[in-house]
Image: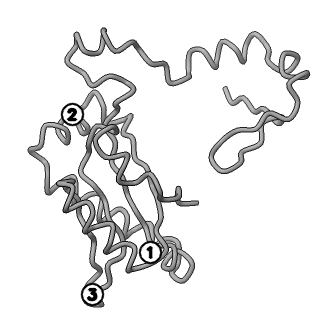
């Protein structure tokens, strides 16, 4: 079932509520049931820790960073392909890492978390790569050949709390 809420407006990856008075009228019992069964429910940290899983507030995430100048100049498919190359390379290059194994496990393969961000251009991409290297964050800087152009970057999967600060100032790619 698809539920749409025309009174919610997406804005900069947040939701603004325009009409709270009509919200209760628009949410039927059926849509509330759908929302409760299909929302990304989070179990408490204790039960996850008992199962040996990472707590939901510290989910495994892979960061992918694209260049805005290339997004504006290249066909979208080409830019997406660059991000895919970097992501797969970062995963494959760290295939024996415990976080990567958990991220790609049969239990988690359908619920991977990726965050796709952007930097302005090549200089910012290279600076980010240097900061990640200095911080001990394993990543793949994808350099398109034969042109030798650094196009994007992807980390191996990490607990979000480990890497989020490195990406805090970057914009979500839109």
In space, the residues marked 3 and 1 are separated at their CA atoms by: 15 Å
Q: Earlier in the sequence, mark 2 or mark 1?
A: 1
Is 104 above or below relative to 52? below
Q: Residue 169: x and y, percent?
A: 47, 57
Name the residue: 49% across, 74% down.
Answer: 120
Q: Residue 161: x and y, percent?
A: 33, 37
Q: Residue 36: x and y, percent?
A: 60, 15
Cβ–Cβ under 8 Å for marks 3 and 1? no
Is 75 above or below relative to 22? below
Name the residue: 45% across, 72% down.
Answer: 67
User: Who is closer to the viewer here, 100 or 75?
Assistant: 100
Give the class, few, some or many, for how many residues have Cα within 10 Å of label 3's Cα (few <14, many ≥20).
few
Give the class, few, some or many, for how many residues have Cα within 10 Å of label 1's Cα (few <14, many ≥20).
few
Closer to viewer: mark 2 or mark 1: 2
Which corner quadrant of the image does residue 145 belong to?
bottom left
Which quarter of the figure is the N terminus placed in?
top right
Name the residue: 30% across, 90% down.
Answer: 147
Q: Secondary structure at mark 1?
A: helix
Would residue 10 appear left or right of 72 to someone viewing this image?
right
Would residue 153 appear left or right of 52 to someone viewing this image?
right
Say which residue label 1 marks.
78
Q: Earlier in the sequence, mark 2 or mark 3?
A: 2
Say which residue label 3 marks.
148
User: Who is closer to the viewer here, 106 or 121?
Assistant: 121
Name the residue: 78% across, 32% down.
Answer: 5
Say which residue label 2 marks.
102
Q: Secondary structure at mark 2?
A: helix
In space, the residues marked 2 and 3 are separated at their CA atoms by: 33 Å
Which corner quadrant of the image does residue 102 belong to?
top left
User: Who is closer to the viewer here, 110 or 174?
Assistant: 174
């Amino acid at each position: 079932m698809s539920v749409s809420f025309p009174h919610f407006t997406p804005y900069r990856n947040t939701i603004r509520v325009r009409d709270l008075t009509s919200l209760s009228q628009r949410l039927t019992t059926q849509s509330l049931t759908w929302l409760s069964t299909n929302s990304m429910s989070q179990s408490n940290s204790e039960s996850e820790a008992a199962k040996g899983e990472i707590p939901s507030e510290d989910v495994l995430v892979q960061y992918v960073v694209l260049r805005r100048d290339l997004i504006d100049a290249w066909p979208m498919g080409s830019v997406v392909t660059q991000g895919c190359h970097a992501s797969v390379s970062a995963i494959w290059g760290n295939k024996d890492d415990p976080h990567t194994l958990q991220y790609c496990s049969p239990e988690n393969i359908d619920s991977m978390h990726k965050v796709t961000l952007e930097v302005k251009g090549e200089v910012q991409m290279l600076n980010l790569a240097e900061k990640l290297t200095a911080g001990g964050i394993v990543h793949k800087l994808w350099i398109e050949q034969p042109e030798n152009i650094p196009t994007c970057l992807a980390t191996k999967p990490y607990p979000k709390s480990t890497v989020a600060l490195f990406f805090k100032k970057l914009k979500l790619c839109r």
